[in-house]
Image: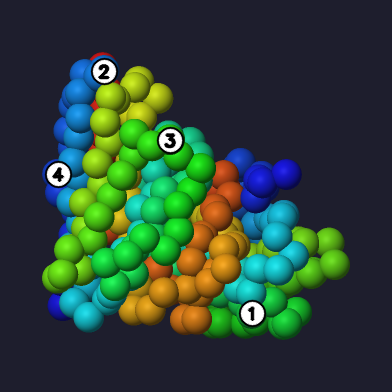
Amino acid sequence: GEDVEQSLFLSVREGDSSVINCTYTDSSSTYLYWYKQEPGAGLQLLTYIFSNMDMKQDQRLTVLLNKKDKHLSLRIADTQTGDSAIYFCAESRGFTGNQFYFGTGTSLTVIP
Amino acid sequence: DAGVTQSPTHLIKTRGQQVTLRCSPISGHKSVSWYQQVLGQGPQFIFQYYEKEERGRGNFPDRFSARQFPNYSSELNVNALLLGDSALYLCASSLVQGAVTGELFFGEGSRLTVL
């Protein structure tokens, strides 16, 4: 199908790790992305991973990519209340990779 | 530096009317994309323009159209509005076309309500 899928909700305690999962559809996607959306705001790029990589780490963020299963995950270490937001994974499609297809979003709630 | 700016931020229309949404990209960015975000869903790709030409179109009806001006700003037009067109319309700009750098810079959106 065309859908990029994510679980809708995740709740974690402050200081714990959060893991947000995503299943994408286009095996030819060159890049896969994680965006964050806070209430009333646009989307902010958190990180991205090139499709020939298995893992990328950027400070508290770790992205894991399983290309065989078309599975992408975002791990946030030491989750803080400021991390509460909606997180979207996205894949790029189109001949020049200029069409971004987003998942439904995972709403992360961090409990103090 | 100014980010991506969109106007208006909120607007209310009735069914059958037409709407024009505007977007100014980050200075130096030549690519502008439009996305529709219905409440509770992820953004859906509508159009991408690069150097004033349409470079991609999502699965939207012909009631949706857009253009890009010589200064790289862009307008999204929606004709014959339907209730289902109620959404947050997001504009994103990038330095180049395609996913070379992977970064789209989003505006805060125009929230359209159709009554």
Report the disc number at residue B103.
none
| Residue bearing mark 3 | B61
| Residue bearing mark 1 | A50
Residue at x 42% of width, y 48% of height: B46
Q: Are marks 3 and 1 in contact (CB under 8 Å)?
A: no
x, y (%) of residue B65? 31, 44
Q: In the rendered image of this protein, does residue B15 appear above or below residue B64?
A: above
Residue at x 35% of width, y 20% of height: B83
Report the disc number at residue B8.
4
For residue A10, side relative to residue A26 (left or right): left
Give me the C-alpha separation between circle 3 and circle 2.
Answer: 16 Å
Give the letter of the chain under mark 4.
B
x, y (%) of residue A44? 40, 64
Circle nearer the viewer, 3 or 1: 3
Q: Is residue A110 visible in this depiction of the protein?
A: no
Give me the C-alpha separation between circle 4 and circle 3.
Answer: 23 Å
Give me the C-alpha separation between circle 1 and circle 4.
Answer: 36 Å
Disc 2 packing (10 Å; few <14; some 14–19; many ≥20): some
x, y (%) of residue A16? 63, 62
Give me the C-alpha separation between circle 2 and circle 4.
Answer: 19 Å
Give the letter of the chain under mark 1.
A
For residue A110, side relative to residue B37 (left or right): right
Give the letter of the chain under mark 3.
B
Amino acid type at image mark 2? Arg
Identify the element where label 3 is drawn: loop
Give me the C-alpha separation between circle 3 and circle 1.
Answer: 32 Å
Report the disc number at residue B15.
2
Q: Are marks 1 and 2 in contact (CB under 8 Å)?
A: no
Identify the element where label 2 is drawn: loop
Q: Are marks 2 and 4 in contact (CB under 8 Å)?
A: no
Give the letter of the chain under mark 2.
B
Q: Quadrant of residue B107?
A: bottom left
